[in-house]
Structures are given as structure tokens and as C-alpha cells.
Amino acid sequence: MKIAVAGGTGMTGSLVVDRLRTRGHDVVVLARAAGVDLVTGDGLADKLSGIDTVVDATSIVARKASDYVHFFGSVASNLQSAGAAAGVRRIVTLSIVGIDGLGGGPFAHYDGKNAQEKATLAGSVPTTILRATQFHGFAGQLIDWTAKGGLLPCPKQPCQPIDVAVVADRLADLATTDESNPHVRLDIAGPEVHLMRDLVRRTAAARGQKLIVIPVWLPGKTAKAIRNGALTAPKDATILGGTFDEWLARTYPR
Ligand SMILES: NC(=O)c1ccc[n+]([C@@H]2O[C@H](COP(=O)([O-])OP(=O)(O)OC[C@H]3O[C@@H](n4cnc5c(N)ncnc54)[C@H](OP(=O)(O)O)[C@@H]3O)[C@@H](O)[C@H]2O)c1
């Protein structure tokens, strides 16, 4: 098959590209580094010629909810409209478990993900939305993005982390499955529930990084929903992959 991976230079997307190429598929990368701006649509139409399936694993790091909504909404709409024009048969979009109605403040990324899901479901190309929980490496990303002067404020956030390698496997499977349903949504999660602040502490320790995690209480409906487990696996989720401990030992061997 001929498959385009939007965000194919990124953390998740590059793993999907590797898997698809190993399985013998013809893969086209859609990213600015490959000459395509998915927000403006520049360069997209040419790259979609002959493509069967598009995987959307794009992302940005921004501050404001409006930036996330603009980015994810534009990318999803452009992939839908250019995909329909090129005869693409399916779009597989990576999203996040439990994000319905969540967003704002430190959770503004979820405003963008909700806009992305809405925009792709509004299009005519059938979409499979794969919602995953936070990756095992997310605690480390939080440290890199938000720790200042050795301090990191962290609200109570139950999570059920999953191995990004397993998420990439699943995306590659879905990209090569001939699905006849118009739109499908699937949830996947890792095997154990943890508090994000514990994973942050343990990641910092495994990295040999001095970090004090400050428990904070955040107001608002998103923070409350997350405290109550909104980001953990829903009942019908598929549980996949190994534990955080196994991943940590593999990633930061002593
Ligand atoms: N981290 C987690 O725990 C987690 C859990 C569940 C789901 N997810 C979802 O996983 C997705 C992928 O995240 P990631 O961390 O793997 O992404 P990432 O490493 O930040 O990669 C982002 C990709 O998007 C591309 N991109 C950014 N702006 C673009 C533009 N204007 N036009 C074309 N391409 C553009 C980048 O390439 P260029 O810079 O070359 O353009 C890059 O390939 C996100 O949507 C996130 O919500 C993450």
C-alpha cells in the first residue's frame, strides 16, 4: 500500500514510518521538513497522489488554546479536503483518551485535539480515531516543558501510561487494515494506573535529575475531571504493552 504519515518526522510518526517501511509499504512523509506545511496546505496535494491511507501523528507545543485549535483543526481539515480530492480511502488519526469537553489553561492541548477530532469527523474520508493514554515518556516531557529551577508543580492526575512503540504498532496496523465502517473510534491504554506526579519523580530520579515535585490543586472542570480519572482507560479500552517500570528500566539502564 501507499501510505502518507503526517508528522512522520516526529516521535510517534517516525516509529510509524519505520514499521510501515519494514512491512514493505511505500511511505510518504508529510511534515515541513519534507516540504509540506499542513496548516496552510502548501505542498500537500502533490504528495497525496496515489495514497491509500493517511496517518495523522502531527503535533505542536504552544501556549494558547486558540493556537492548538488553529493548528490541529487546520491540519485535520486540510488532510480531509486534500485527501478526498486525491481519492484517499481512510485517515487514521492519533488522539488522546478521555478528552471530550476538556481543555483550557495547562490542558489547552486538549482543545486542539477536540478540534482535530471534530474536523476530521466532519470530512468525507472515513476516519479511524485511535485514542491513546499518555505515553510512558510523557512524565519526562512534562519535566522538559514545565520544570523551572528544579521545581515542577503537578496536580493530582491519575494516568494509565502506554508504550509509544505499541501505539505506533497499532497505528501501522490500522493504516493497513481495510475498514469498511465510515468512522470508527478506538481507545487503547497501558496496563496500570499511576499518579502522574509519581511518574515525574521516578523519571527525574532515573535520569539523575534533581527535581522537587510540588503537589498543586487546580480549579475548574477540566482539572476536576482529570482528578477523577478522565484520562484513564474507559471500560471498552484495549489494554496493550508493558508496564511503566519495565519501560523505565529499559530507557534508563543503570
Ligand atoms: N505524548 C503523549 O503522551 C501522547 C499520548 C497520546 C496521544 N498523543 C498525540 O500524539 C501526537 C503526536 O505527538 P508527538 O509527540 O509524537 O509529535 P512530535 O514529536 O512533536 O512531532 C510532531 C510532528 O508534526 C509535524 N508538524 C508540526 N507542524 C507542522 C506543520 N505545520 N506542517 C506539517 N507538519 C507539521 C512535525 O514535523 P515538522 O516540524 O518537520 O513540520 C513532526 O513530524 C499528538 O497529536 C499528541 O496529541 C501524545
Image (cartoon, grey):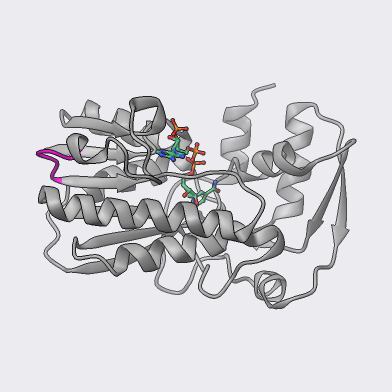
Foreground of the two, 98 or 243: 98
The residue positioned 74% from the left and 28% from the top of the image is: 207
Q: Is residue 179 magenta?
A: no
Looking at the figure, which quarter contains the C terminus?
Answer: top right
Q: Residue 159 at what x, y percent from top left?
A: 62, 59
Q: Residue 200 at what x, y percent from top left?
A: 74, 45
Q: Residue 25 at what x, y percent from top left?
A: 16, 31
Considering only vertical position in the picture, is 100 above or below 67? Answer: below
The residue positioned 52% from the left and 69% from the top of the image is: 98
Foreground of the two, 195 or 88: 88
Considering only vertical position in the picture, is 155 above or below 210? Answer: below
Q: Quadrant of residue 7?
A: top left
Residue range (magenta): 48-52
Q: Main secondary structure of the magenta part?
A: loop
Q: Quadrant of residue 120?
A: bottom left
24 lies left or right of 9: left
